[in-house]
Amino acid sequence: MEPIAYVNGAFVPLSEAKVSILDRGFLFADGIYEVAAVLDGKLIDNASHLARLERSVGEIALALPESIERIQEIQKELVKRNNLVNGMVYLEVTRGADTGRDFAFPKGVKPTLIMFTSVKDIVNAPSARTGIDVITVPDLRWARRDIKSVALLAQVLAKQAAAEANAGEAWMIEDGKVTEGGSSSCFILTQDDVIVTRQNGSEILPGCTRKAVVKLAEERQLRIEERAFSVEEALAAKEAFITSATVFVQAVVSIDGKKVGNGKPGPMTDRLREIYVDFAKATAV
């Protein structure tokens, strides 16, 4: 069966899902997106993703064409129509299509809302057992990285560099410090067992999985520091890992070809992954 997508009020076969070439998402990257994981046919931590969606559209004065409640209904219907067991729901809202191309916001134009699903077994991914290698690249992005914009060219270039190096992720570096991964939040575990991740601010996206992992760690009285760290500090750490909706908690076993710890996923990373998966299954909707 052909996958089903959602476009501006209609569920349609993916091959028939289309928007105008004048859509501002296409012309200006004038839009916001979210990705929610699906486990056993249910959405994971979706309230957090929809709250971030509301914040991001608010930061660029973009009105949602549907209520948050209705957006979740559409997500669930899409999961159902695609018989999706494990994977993701991608959501994008743009400022819509005007009659021409003008930088200023158009008047009287309804925003575009599209969604589609993809299959991925996040829990049983082979890289969860082996860990991934990462490379470092300069952070070339704009100043408002806290907005989940569809303008992802710098991340595309970073992820392509990682792919060419047979690495699983790229860590972006600014002023000698790690900001975040191409599509993930970055963590290290220091030699004295402190979990370190960069504090939220305009320099990074406030990751939903990052937020949940920090809270789950704090609930278990694990020591957390929210601050910037360098690649040198990461290489001197016991463990390193990333978090995102599409990998949950993923061990980093090398950076730029140099081992982190013993070059294998560490016990803290494995523990946090198990804790997060339990949380995800218990709170799915």
Image: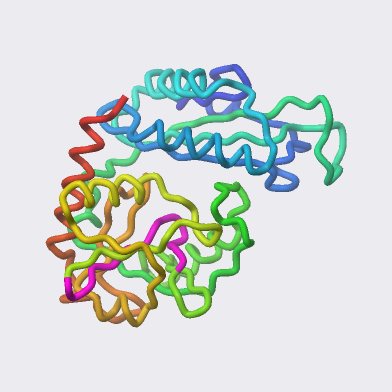
Question: Which residue is the extreme one toward the left?
Answer: 267
| Residue 26 seen anywhere in this rendered image of the structure | yes
Residue 144's place in the image compared with 68, above or below, is: below
Which stretch appears magenta? Answer: 179-192
Q: Residue shown at 63%/61% (left/top)? A: 143
Describe residue 147's horizontal placement relative to residue 97 as left or right: left
Q: Position of residue 104 (x, y in %)?
A: 84, 43
Q: Quadrant of residue 237?
A: bottom left
- Front residue (pair 21, 244): 244
- Front residue (pair 70, 84): 70
- Asked if the stretch drawn in magenta spans residue 80, the answer is no
Q: Quadrant of the N terminus?
A: top left
Describe residue 246's horizontal placement relative to residue 27 as left or right: left
Q: Residue shown at 35%/48% (left/top)? A: 211
Q: Residue shown at 36%/68% (left/top)? A: 167
- Front residue (pair 142, 2): 142
Residue 34's place in the image compared with 47, above or below, is: below
Q: Position of residue 228 (x, y in %)?
A: 41, 70
User: Which color mode does the image show?
Assistant: rainbow
Describe residue 29's horizontal placement relative to residue 15 as left or right: right
Q: Residue shown at 52%/30% (left/top)? A: 115
